[in-house]
Image (tube, coloured by chain):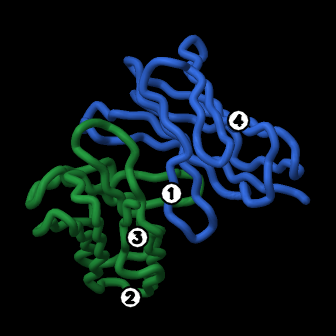
Chain colours: A green, B blue
C-alpha cells in the first residue's frame, strides 16, 4: 500500500512565524503535490514537484515556498504565517508516467492566530 | 478555462437508498476523470477513475460512475448507501493545461446518511 505521511495532524502557530509542513511518501513516486483545502473551494494546488530539487507553482503559490531535497520528502514552508493561511493542507504523491491517481496523506490542519 | 462543478454542496439520503452525486466539467479535450472520497479527519481516497474505453466504470466500496461526453458529466452512483458512506466526495479532472500531472478539483459534495 502506498503511504503518504504528514508530520503533524494539527498545528497552531502565531502570525509571523515560519512554519514547516513535512510530507514523506514511500512509493518512490516522482511527483509530489501540496494542496490547501477550504470549505466551498475544494482543493487548490499550491506547488508541485516532479523531481528532486524541481518545483512548479500551482494555482495559489503566494506566501508559500517548497523544498524537495530527497525524492521521498516534500516540504511546504510558510515564510511568515498569516491568519489567512489557516487551512487544511494536504500532501499527495503520484507516479510520473501519467495523470493517474494521486495518493493523499491525512492532512495537517493549521491554525494561525 | 478548465473547471469542475459539483452542483450539490450537501446531500442527505436514508440508509439503503440509492445515491447519485453530480459532476460537470469544462475541458477542451477528452479528460481523465476521478472521484475521491474524504472521511472526516482523513485524506482523500480514490474511488474510481476514467481514462478511456467503457464509459461506465466501477470503483471501490460499490460505487460506479458514468462518463457522458454529450453532457460533460461524470456522475457518481451507488445503488444502496451505507451509514459508513457519510463523507465528502470530490470530482476531479486532469491533466491541467499548465501542468501535465495536475488535477482540477470540484468544491465537493458532503453526504449525510440517515439511519
The residues tagged by marks 4 and 1 sit, at their Cα atoms, a distance apart of 18 Å
The residues tagged by marks 3 and 2 sit, at their Cα atoms, a distance apart of 11 Å
Q: Which residue is denoted by mark 1 in the rendering?
A: B44
Image spot of residue B3 (x, y percent): 46, 33
Q: Earlier in the sequence, mark 4 or mark 1?
A: 1
The residues tagged by marks 3 and 4 sit, at their Cα atoms, a distance apart of 35 Å
Q: Tag 4, which chain?
A: B
Could you say which is closer to the camera, residue B31 or residue B60?
A: B60
Labels 1 and 3 share a subunit: no
Identify the mark at residue B77; answer none if there is no mark.
Answer: 4
Q: Earlier in the sequence, mark 3 or mark 2?
A: 2
Labels 1 and 2 share a subunit: no
Answer with left or right where residue B41 lies relative to residue B114.
left
Q: Tag 3, which chain?
A: A
> Tags 1 and 3 in contact by the CB under 8 Å rule?
no
Answer with left or right where residue B37 lies relative to residue B32.
right
Q: Which residue is denoted by mark 2 in the rendering?
A: A14
Q: Which residue is denoted by mark 3 in the rendering?
A: A85
Image spot of residue A61 (x, y percent): 27, 57
Amino acid at each position: 500500500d502506498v503511504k503518504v505521511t504528514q508530520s503533524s495532524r494539527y498545528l497552531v502557530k502565531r502570525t509571523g512565524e515560519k512554519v514547516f509542513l513535512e510530507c514523506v511518501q514511500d512509493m518512490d513516486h516522482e511527483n509530489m503535490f501540496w494542496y490547501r483545502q477550504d470549505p466551498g473551494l475544494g482543493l487548490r494546488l499550491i506547488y508541485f514537484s516532479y523531481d528532486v530539487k524541481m518545483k512548479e507553482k500551482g494555482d495559489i503559490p503566494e506566501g508559500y515556498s517548497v523544498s524537495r531535497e530527497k525524492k521521498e520528502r516534500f516540504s511546504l514552508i510558510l515564510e511568515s504565517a498569516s491568519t489567512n493561511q489557516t487551512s487544511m493542507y494536504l500532501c499527495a504523491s503520484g507516479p510520473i508516467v501519467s495523470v493517474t491517481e494521486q495518493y493523499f496523506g491525512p492532512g495537517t490542519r493549521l491554525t494561525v492566530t | 478555462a478548465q473547471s469542475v462543478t459539483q452542483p450539490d454542496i450537501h446531500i442527505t439520503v436514508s440508509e439503503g437508498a440509492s445515491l447519485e452525486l453530480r459532476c460537470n466539467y469544462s475541458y477542451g479535450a477528452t479528460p481523465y476523470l476521478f472521484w475521491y472520497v474524504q472521511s472526516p479527519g482523513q485524506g482523500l481516497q480514490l474511488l474510481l477513475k476514467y481514462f478511456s474505453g467503457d464509459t461506465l466504470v466501477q470503483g471501490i466500496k460499490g460505487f460506479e460512475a458514468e462518463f457522458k461526453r454529450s453532457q460533460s458529466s461524470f456522475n457518481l452512483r451507488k445503488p444502496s448507501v451505507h451509514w459508513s458512506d457519510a463523507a465528502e466526495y470530490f470530482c476531479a479532472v486532469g491533466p491541467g493545461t499548465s501542468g501535465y500531472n495536475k488535477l482540477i478539483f470540484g468544491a465537493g459534495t458532503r453526504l449525510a446518511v440517515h439511519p
